[in-house]
Amino acid sequence: MADASFCPDCKRSTEVVLDHSAGDMVCLECGLVLEAHSIDETSEWRTFANESSENDPVRVGGPSNPLLTDGGLSTVIAKPNGAQGDFLSSSLGRWQTRGSNPDRSLILAFRTIANMADRLGLVATIKDRANEIYKKVEDLKSIRGRNQDAILAACLYIACRQEDRPRTVKEICSVANGATKKEIGRAKEYIVKQLEVEMGQSMEMGTIHAGDFLRRFCSHLGMSNQAVKAAQEAVQKSEELDIRRSPISIAAAVIYMITQLSEEKKPLRDISLATGVAEGTIRNSYKDLYPYASRIIPASFAKEEDLKNLCSP
Amino acid sequence: MQIGSEQVWLHMAQYNLEGCQSVDLAEHPSGIVPTLQNIVSTVNLGCKLDLKIIALQARNAEYNPKVCTGAKSEEQSKLAARKYARVVQKVGFQAQFMDFKVQNVVASCDVKFPIRLERLALHHNAFCSFEPEIFPGLIYRMKDPKIVLLIFVSGKIVLTGAKSRDQIKRGFEQIYPVVLEYRKVPQIGNEGKDSRDPVPRQLT
């Protein structure tokens, strides 16, 4: 409580005490008030360790977003609970939309990306990267007329690829709002080209491999650990072969082969649903893969006789 | 034939000329000659045309802005252009034959061995775009000559965006050694990738 400070009356350094009730700093020797109404900057309320950390009263507002112009400090008037009619037509609504928030479209886009990311169960890193990519593209202004949904979906797709957790275009399609595979593909090419022009050669996105998706497809189907490992080995070996099919189709065909060899056989329909590959395509890829079955399936998983049991396509 | 007000666009149809004559190795060191598939050219007739009248009066004419017909070689393209100019003349317009220019030449060929597209895309990252989900072929954008090549796993290559037959030839001769490096060697009972990893080279 006692500090040392220079007292003008005593003309020397004296002990000073802080009186909290009035916020005064008082010299102990002569009683002179050195500073009145000093603002107490300690916490206003007590927080305990075992209380719910959902609403930490020490913190106000959400995390600051460096992508928005002022870190997202602006205030939004929320729609009141139990409000009748359309918020936008009421006076409060009009005042809210009239405000010149330069980031309005950006915030809307971020919200859409967040929606899509949540539906796919993506982590915050991928979502943030997608937001960054969108901001960079948005700055270029040349996407004005383009299909906004496709651009957002493509940003998410690129973010997944850059984080080495690729998602198939079909998966992105499933959560994108009406964008087709073709549109997303075109948007992706466009964005990559624009960003390469802007920032030099920094778009390092490797080609997709069947193995990247295998783990996820297998867990959707509920395959056993052994089967998953066998499938991963099989896919590794299949890359040596000369099979001219999309990597996703190869992954689906390998899963089909592995499940046919194990006890829990999955029907084509389930595999088709989990991977997004059509049943006919899986059958055709299986036909291409069948001659090499002995080479790609690891010996630890299935012996030669089991392979003979494998149905011929 | 597409007729705009002054310019005429000619797309000429494809035909397959299987190279039965022997290949001059001085001209084509790779031993393979790309076959031309499509040629697009423009010519300026030098007068305003009324499209409705031409469509009604000339034979073999459809007034359908999206229609294209096709061409085989540059000489045939020019010949066809002259023929169409004649047709337009007969209808009654004062057509001239100015600024005949070939705009685009498309060719295809086969190197006859499978190619490792992924490795090629990895090493020539700056020029290649390979998305097997979107399109099964690798898109190689060559800077000099400025053409686009579609390279497929089977070994078939499509060259487009060239303004002349010479550009096609040069482009193909440049890509042939690159594609040779990434040839897929069929492994029979031999696990593991081939140890010889091609060193990335800069192409102009």
Image: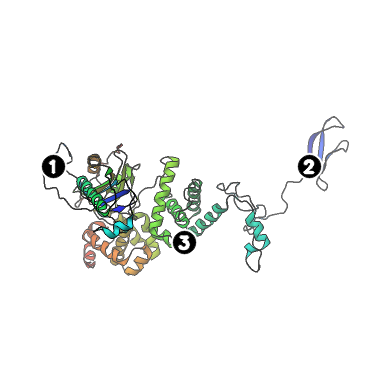
**In the visual, does A244 lie left or right of A189?**
left
Determine contact: label 3, label 1, CB under 8 Å.
no
Say which chain tag 1 marks: B
As measured in the structure, the alpha-carbon distance from the residue carrying label 2 to the one carrying label 1 is 100 Å
Position in image of residue A274 (x %, y %): 38, 64
- Circle on res. A1: 2
Viewer-nearest of discs 3 and 1: 1
Crowd around label 3: few <14 · some 14–19 · many ≥20 (10 Å): some
Residue extending farthest right: A30
- Circle on res. A177: 3
Closest to the observer: A96 or A81? A96
Residue at (36, 48) in percent of width and height: A206
Say which chain tag 2 marks: A
Q: Secondary structure at mark 1?
A: loop
Say which chain tag 3 marks: A
Residue bearing mark 1 = B23
Crowd around label 1: few <14 · some 14–19 · many ≥20 (10 Å): some
Determine contact: label 2, label 1, CB under 8 Å.
no
Q: Is residue B155 visible?
A: no
Position in image of residue A171 (x %, y %): 41, 60
**In the visual, does A189 lie left or right of B184?**
right
Position in image of residue B196 (x %, y %): 25, 41
Viewer-nearest of discs 2 and 1: 1
Crowd around label 2: few <14 · some 14–19 · many ≥20 (10 Å): few
As measured in the structure, the alpha-carbon distance from the residue carrying label 3 to the one carrying label 1 is 54 Å
The quarter in which the C terminus of chain B is drawn is: top left
- Circle on res. A280: none
